[in-house]
Image (cartoon, rainbow, N blue to C red):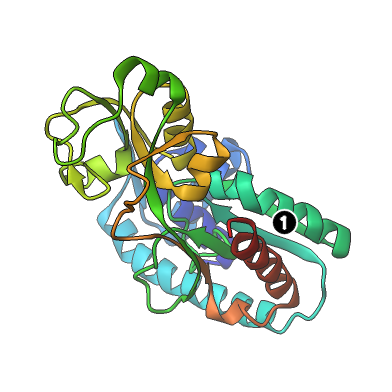
Amino acid sequence: MNWDDTRIFLALSREASLRGAARALGVDQATVGRRIAAMERDLGAKLFLRASDGYLLTPAGESALAAARRMESAALELQAKIDGQDEALSGTVRVTSTDSIAIDFLIPAVAALHEAQPGIRVDLEASSQMLNLTRRQADIAIRNMKPENPDLFARRIAQWPVALFASEGYLAARGEPAPNTEFAGHDLVAYKGYLDGGKGLTLLDEPTRQGRIAAALNSSLLVRRAVAAGLGIGEMPVYMGEKEGLVRLWPGRTRKANYEVWLVTHPDLRGTARVRAVAKFLTEAIQGAAD
């Protein structure tokens, strides 16, 4: 099994559909199907079973998967070490971040970077999912939590206080909640990822048992826009609330835990000139713009 075949095999094992594997690899479905069929003929074994819920690995496919992952790991390690010695200020750098940070900081930073280093292309993906840096799905990640993987290099580049906000329209209609009432009689805007974790919702560390969740949203940008639309009360970093023109509630109070911003890269890529340049511009933008 060569590396090109291995990439196709791994993509189909992860995506469980020809369409998903083709999309991940940037090829057409017919190519994936044809290459998998050729691999099975060459190996003399069936690697996948076609089921109602997609392509499932056979016992032979499970055995091949372990070897394929080792091959992938070796190939990615080799590529990372080669990239790490690249001193050219040109080429593509893949960046992933949340939508709010991407809009508020990263896009202006990429524009400034392009003026200074036009040979560097930045591919920016705004997503609430943690793309896999070890599999080179991204070169730089800007996230609000430190990754658990000890093999990645992570540096906290900012931490912002979190406060409570509402729109002027909401407050005119509903008034301001009193502290220690658990938001009785008020509508709330929640971050869906927090609710999915099974925790009871708190805002500025106060329980919300007497309030009503009007909307649960899966991104910080949607949360702040929902609060701005008057859907309810929500918490967010102070700079976000001020940027939206919202009214800060309980102004002397902030959440105990600040909103942290982490820059994450693969250690082997830290020495790459284009990755260093992009990381520098992004870091300076984030550290300077929300002061």
Q: Which residue shows up at 41% across the image and 45% down it?
A: 236
Which amino acid, mark 1? Ala
**Residue 251 x, y percent position in the rendering:** 37, 46
Q: Residue at x 86, y 64 (%)?
A: 116
Horizontal side, residue 46 vs residue 207: left or right: right
Who is closer to the viewer here, 66 or 137? 137
Horizontally, is 201 left or right of 89 in the view? left
Q: Position of residue 47 (x, y in %)?
A: 36, 52
Q: Residue 230: where, in percent of width, then height? A: 41, 21
Find disc 1 in the rendering and name its residue. 109
At x 51% / y 78%, what residue is drawn? Answer: 74
Q: Quadrant of residue 136?
A: bottom right
- Percent from the top left, x then y, of residue 186? 24, 24
Q: Where is the C terminus found, in terms of image quarters?
A: bottom right
Residue at figure coordinates x 34%, y 26% from the top left: 232
One can see residue 26 in this view: no
